[in-house]
């Protein structure tokens, strides 16, 4: 097995791990080295960011975690590399902590800024501690336990007759449960924080033990605190208890401080430092007492077998059983201070003495329970496997055996409210289930938090939970994928609010396809500018998202969204409203990939049908401009030839050309109507000529009249040409080839997804538009020809409408058909007035 960045378990004494000596990885991956370089670059820019950071009171420092977690996860792999990722995430959080601590030291943000930064530091410490717990436990469960057979029931059991140390070494190697207990203890000791409590020995230096008592005993007549104050008469360690008298008041105070300092060192896992402290303050007997818990091993038995005659030092305490019985009695006694009792209780498995002192902190109580459980299991194994008679332990000692579940149940109903609050809070629940290895229940709790209190969950809480779920998924501990996705999706929604496309795309890619489409399309709906849209599409492509489906859903969501009337303000006549502008602009999402040209036509045509039915011609024109002018060539190039174009795209292409012809006809009519209504005005008539009019004024008037006649001639010619063009473009609508205007071409079969496309509804819309637009086009055409004097053309229009070839008459209602025939009748009347028959032919007798 490859070396791990997490320290290996080193078995000595009670087989402690090296977790509490150093949590920093020794061989970080290349990604972590790159991350450190990135942190160095950020420090170079810190001076520029100080002003902004001062305004947001450290929030920008915390928000750096989003992209940095993303950078770390990009290097994620399977197996052991996943644990390197956890180490890297811890490293990132620690870097942010250091920045916040520097800001607090510099007084940035004033009092409020300091309070907010301290709150962030508290959260980061708890998050780092949880990452360290997760790494320690699952590194053992995934990598170490898979390399050896797991046998919690000790089917084979340790070797009988071995030394205490050998027996416990084998026990730790075989019993994964006990090993996990020890890992949690090491984690609790590594994370121990004294808080803001003062150093109990800050005012002391190396000295002789109990020097004030010694001085008073030697100078009893000159005692500084008066004669008659009873103190011990001897200075042996048991004198105070035996004589039931106190030490000198100052020594009592010093003794209590030393006991407290020793216990805090033991609580933080620094037993050897506690021994040094005892020796430093002259209480060598206390140091000797603290050595009594060590497991006994005499290596000379094995050495003698091998033929070596050099005597090896004996390890541990050969009378450990007697020492332990005495330590239990000390912890159970009321004659000692609470710190001394708790210190003895740690090594003798006396839970009551520990709970008396550590009753107000969840982590301290958990540590106390686990220390006792480890002690009971170790002692039980030693007495069962070592061939030696041991002093019996009290029944209360053996009755203290509990399972991990029972421990957590007791913490949940602890007397202290702060312990209960933490146990029932998010971090307490997360840490409990990580320790119990009940990942399914942990995910269920997270889902409830996300569903019930989404607004109350900070983005950093969501980030934390999402990355726990991603790690559990990576190591195969996620059973219900749908619930895990809800947590990741909640984090993605928080990222959407921040608008970082790379992060959104990366985490969205870890979800199932329907959720991917739903979330990323929701993000795209918020992106309005061209450059951010390009970045969002690029990020989705890099993350491997289904960009075609996402952009299609995005456009459909925007196109079909319902907005209350007047929400964006009503536009003036001929202008495009903000709602319509947003819908039309959404078509840009379908222009980035050449493969989506067919989808672009489909969505554009759907918009145009709506706008045409609402008589929003300007919206039609704007929508039409979103489609590339060479769309036909692009489709042919995409599918190789015209014959290979799929049915949907073929129908969309003809529909698009129908609208193109329609807009051309309408625009031509608008231009003709403008010209027709803007005939050059005749110049104002001059005053009646008189004998006083001079020649110059008459000449000027004649030139104006001549210029007007020329302008009228040009206008008449231009109007005639425009009328001819307009008649042609309007006839193009009526005479559209291949079954007619807005009629699909013949296709062998409907598209495979015709139901999803709502194909029948589209056909109904097109038929309705034919019944609206074709009669209107015919009326426009009749108006142009009538006003242009082409009365015979008006009559021929009736032939086109009644022709069985195109059957245009079928789109008419009786009312609209009567209206058209009445106008054609007017044209026939004009023909009769011109001495022609009603059809425009000369009358023959």
Image (spheres, rainbow, N blue to C red):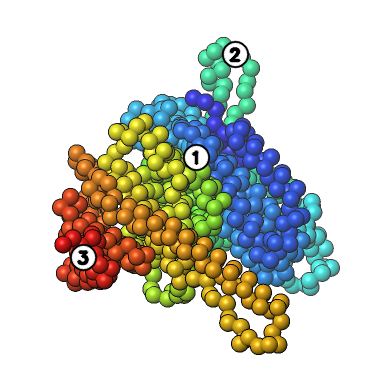
Q: Out of 650 and 359, give the one closest to the viewer.
A: 650
Q: In which quarter of the image is residue 821?
A: bottom left
Q: Quadrant of residue 304?
A: top right
Residues under numbered marks 3 and 2 in contact, where contact means CB atoms less than 8 Å apart:
no
Asked if residue 1 is positioned above or below residue 344 in the image, the reply reads: above
Q: Residue at x 39, y 70 (%)?
A: 563
Q: Which of marks 3 and 1 is in front?
A: 3
The circle drawn on residue 308 is 2
Rounded to the nearest angstrom, the CA distance separating label 2 from label 1 is 67 Å
> Crowding near pointer 2: few (<14 within 10 Å), some, many (20+)?
few
- The answer to whether one can see residue 231 in this image is no
Q: Give the structural element (helix, strand or loop) at label 1.
A: helix
Asked if residue 309 is positioned above or below residue 59 in the image, the reply reads: above
Residue that badge 1 annotates: 542
Rounded to the nearest angstrom, the CA distance separating label 3 from label 2 is 137 Å
Q: Which residue is drawn at 61% across and 32% down?
A: 30
Figure disc tally: 3
Q: Position of residue 278 (x, y in %)?
A: 69, 48
Q: In this view, does 688 lie to the left or right of 607?
A: right
Residue that badge 3 annotates: 838
Q: Give the structural element (helix, strand or loop) at label 2.
A: loop
Q: Where is residue 252 in the image (x, y as percent from the top left)?
A: 69, 63
First-in-chain label (2 vs 1) = 2
Q: Position of residue 396 (x, y in %)?
A: 40, 53
């Amino acid at each position: 097995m490859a070396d791990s960045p997490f320290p290996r378990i080193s078995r000595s004494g009670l087989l402690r791990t090296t977790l509490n000596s150093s949590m920093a990885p020794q061989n970080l991956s290349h990604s972590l080295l790159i991350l450190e370089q990135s942190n160095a670059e950020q420090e170079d820019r810190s001076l520029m960011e100080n002003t902004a950071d001062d305004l947001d009171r450290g929030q920008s420092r915390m928000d750096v975690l989003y992209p940095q977690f993303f950078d770390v996860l990009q290097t994620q792999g399977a197996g052991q590399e996943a644990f390197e990722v956890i180490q890297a995430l811890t490293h990132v959080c620690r870097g942010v902590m250091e920045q916040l601590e520097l800001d607090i030291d510099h007084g940035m943000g004033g009092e409020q800024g300091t309070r907010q930064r301290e709150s962030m530091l508290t959260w980061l410490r708890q998050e780092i501690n949880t990452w360290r717990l997760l790494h320690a436990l699952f590194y053992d469960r995934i990598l170490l336990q898979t390399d050896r057979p797991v046998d919690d029931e000790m089917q084979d059991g340790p070797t009988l007759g071995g030394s205490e140390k050998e027996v416990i070494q084998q026990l730790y190697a075989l019993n994964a449960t006990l090993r996990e207990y020890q890992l949690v203890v090491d984690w609790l000791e590594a994370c121990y924080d004294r808080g803001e409590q003062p150093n109990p020995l800050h005012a002391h230096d190396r000295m002789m033990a109990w020097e004030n008592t010694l001085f008073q005993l030697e100078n009893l007549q000159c005692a500084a605190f008066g004669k008659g104050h009873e103190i011990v008469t001897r200075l042996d360690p048991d004198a105070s208890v035996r004589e039931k008298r106190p030490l000198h008041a100052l020594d009592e105070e010093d003794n209590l401080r030393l006991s407290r300092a020793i216990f805090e060192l033991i609580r933080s896992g620094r037993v050897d430092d506690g021994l040094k402290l005892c020796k430093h303050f002259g209480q060598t007997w206390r140091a000797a007492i603290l050595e009594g818990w060590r497991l006994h091993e005499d290596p000379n038995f094995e050495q003698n077998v091998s033929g070596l005659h050099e005597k090896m030092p004996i390890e541990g305490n050969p009378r450990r059983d007697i020492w332990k019985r005495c330590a239990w009695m000390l912890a159970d006694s009321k004659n000692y201070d609470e710190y001394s009792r708790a210190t003895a209780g740690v090594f003798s498995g006396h839970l009551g003495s520990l709970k008396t002192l550590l009753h107000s902190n969840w982590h301290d109580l958990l540590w106390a329970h686990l220390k006792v459980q480890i002690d009971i299991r170790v002692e039980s194994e030693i007495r069962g496997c070592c061939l030696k008679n041991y002093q019996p332990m009290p029944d209360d000692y053996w009755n203290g055996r509990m399972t991990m579940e029972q421990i957590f149940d007791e913490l949940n109903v602890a007397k202290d409210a702060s312990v209960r609050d933490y146990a029932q809070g998010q971090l307490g629940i997360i840490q409990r289930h990580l320790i119990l290895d009940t990942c399914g229940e942990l995910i269920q709790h997270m889902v409830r938090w996300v569903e019930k209190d989404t607004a109350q969950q900070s983005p950093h809480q969501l980030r934390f939970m999402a990355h726990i779920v991603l790690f559990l998924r990576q190591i195969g501990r996620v059973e219900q994928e749908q619930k895990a996705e809800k947590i990741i999706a909640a984090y993605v929604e928080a990222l959407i609010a921040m608008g970082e496309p790379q992060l959104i795309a990366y985490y969205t890619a870890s979800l199932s396809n329907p959720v991917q489409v739903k979330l990323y399309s929701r993000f795209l709906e918020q992106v309005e500018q061209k450059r951010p849209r390009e970045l969002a599409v690029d990020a989705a492509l890099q993350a491997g998202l289904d960009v075609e489906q996402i952009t299609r859903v995005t456009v459909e969501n925007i196109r079909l969204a319902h907005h209350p009337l007047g929400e964006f303000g009503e536009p003036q006549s001929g202008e495009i409203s903000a709602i319509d502008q947003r819908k039309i602009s959404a078509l840009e999402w379908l222009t980035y990939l050449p493969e989506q040209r067919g989808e672009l036509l489909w969505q554009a045509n759907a918009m145009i049908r709506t706008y045409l039915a609402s008589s929003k011609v300007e919206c039609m024109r704007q929508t039409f401009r979103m489609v590339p002018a060479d769309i036909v060539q692009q489709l042919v190039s995409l599918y190789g030839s015209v014959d290979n174009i799929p049915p949907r795209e073929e129908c969309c292409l003809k529909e698009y050309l129908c609208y193109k012809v329609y807009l051309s006809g309408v625009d031509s009519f608008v231009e003709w109507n403008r010209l027709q209504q803007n005939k050059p005005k005749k110049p104002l008539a001059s005053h009646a000529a008189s004998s006083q009019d001079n020649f110059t004024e008459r000449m000027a008037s004649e030139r104006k009249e001549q210029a007007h006649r020329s302008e009228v001639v040009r206008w008449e010619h231009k109007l005639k040409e425009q009328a001819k063009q307009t008649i042609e473009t309007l006839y193009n609508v009526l005479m559209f080839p291949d079954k007619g205007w807005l009629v699909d071409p013949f296709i062998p079969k409907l598209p495979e997804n015709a139901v999803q496309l709502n194909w029948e509804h589209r056909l109904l819309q097109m038929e309705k538009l034919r019944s609206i637009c074709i009669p209107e086009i015919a009326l426009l055409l009749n108006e142009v020809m009538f006003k242009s004097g082409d009365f015979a053309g008006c009559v021929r229009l009736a032939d086109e409408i009644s022709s069985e070839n195109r059957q245009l008459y079928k789109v008419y209602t009786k009312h609209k058909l009567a209206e058209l025939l009445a106008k054609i009748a007017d044209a026939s009347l004009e023909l009769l007035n011109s001495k022609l028959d009603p059809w425009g032919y000369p009358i023959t007798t």
